[in-house]
Amino acid sequence: DVYKRQTQERVYRLNGGYPPMLDAEPVSDVWVLDAEFWQHATTDAPAMAGHGLVTSADGRAWALGGIGADDWLRPLDVLTTFRVLRIHARLEVVVEHVNVPGPVPDSCFGQAFVAIEGGGSILSVGGACLGDPLNPAPGQLWEYRIDANRWHRLADLPVAISDHTAVEARDRIWVFGGSTAGGLSNEVFFYDLLVGGWGVVPTSGQRPDRRRNHSAVAVGKTMVVFGGIREPFFPETVDDAWQLDFDTLVWSEKAPMPVGLAGVSADAIPRQMNVSPTIKVLIYGGVVDAWSFPPDLSDRTLVYTSDSRVRRGRAREVFPTAAAD
């Protein structure tokens, strides 16, 4: 249900998801957005929904987790990759499968996947996992090292969390929102990639409401959060957008989306494609009404524009560095 930019081709990709119909099963379609037009690329990919899709340094997109065609969680010992090739005026997608030996994360749903800057590894953050019902271990952090083709267990999260977001910026992983044992969250946690420990981000100003199944993207000196579901038992999609400034750690509310959406795909538009110095994010799809059956889904392609300017560089240290366990 997500897409990711391939910087060499400046292309966005969309794979899998659920169609809006009764008894829907995950689909295997792969679409690419080149300039302003969607192209249907292939149906050779495995059927999947609710998965993550991140891009490595070599331009491949890696599909991880989610639910397969048999309605079972997809294990992380076989990963699916997509490579976009430009053949004349058309884009073609090559699908490959990578078998990963050794220990792997538990089969989970609601985890967040994030590629580390440079594209050499992928993190699996949290999730609600199956296995031993007395020890589901949903607070795990794992790193997949692409060159070694191995998963490695890192320090556990401070809380068990799922349906959250995780982005990479400033040598840290920033985790926001999600479902915990105590209900929905609007806290921000960080994992220090240099030191290897977790901490809580002391944000200031009005914070976004507690939520799950939202979307987030890191761009410039900010993290932008879109939509989500506000209530855990009586789900209501929300239309708001928020930005967290990495320098000041202050939240600010931005103009809302046209309609409340949860689970939208979002990615920053790169500077070479953005003629203005302001932040722009491409948003696609999402759930409009979390109560409807069959689900009320959006097929809109939106562009979010912030009044914040894109600025690179290191952040000022406004909170202590995490200590390794």
Image (cartoon, rainbow, N blue to C red):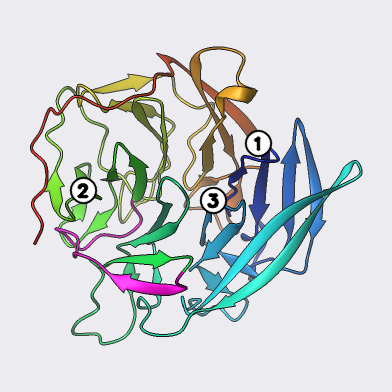
In the rendered view, tell whether residue 57 sits above or below residue 144: above
Image quadrant in which you'd find residue 295: bottom right
Upstream in sequence: badge 1 or badge 2: 2
Residue 136 spot, x, y in % from top left: 25, 78
- For disc 1, the neighbor class at 10 Å (few under 14, some 14 to 19, many from 20) is few
Residue 256 horizontal side relative to residue 222, left or right: right
For the C terminus, the image quarter is: bottom left
Query: Label 3 vs label 2: CA separation?
Result: 21 Å
- In 3D space, how far apart are the residues under numbered discs 1 and 3 (Cα atoms)? 29 Å
Find disc 2 in the rendering and name its residue: 192
205 or 218: which is nearer to us? 218
**Who comes first in sequence, dot 1 or dot 3?**
3
Which quadrant: the N terminus?
A: bottom right
Residue type of the residue flagged with mark 1:
Arg
Of badges 1 and 3, the one in the foreground is: 3
Element under disc 2: strand
Q: Which residue is mark 1?
A: 300
Mark 1–mark 2 distance (CA, rounded to whole Å): 36 Å
Q: Position of residue 149 (x, y in %)?
A: 47, 73
Q: Residue at x 73, y 52 (%)?
A: 84
Badge 1 marks a residue whose secondary structure is: loop
Which region shows up in magenta? 148-164
Residue lying at the far right in this picture: please name it: 88
User: Mark 2 or mark 3, which is nearer the start of the sequence?
Assistant: 3
Disc 3 target residue: 57
207, above or below 325, in the image:
above
Percent position of residue 190, x then y: 21, 46
Local SS, label 3: loop
Looking at the picture, does residue 69 appear above or below residue 34? below
**Picture layout, residue 213 above or below residue 315:** below
Q: Give the number of the mark in front: 3 or 2.
A: 3
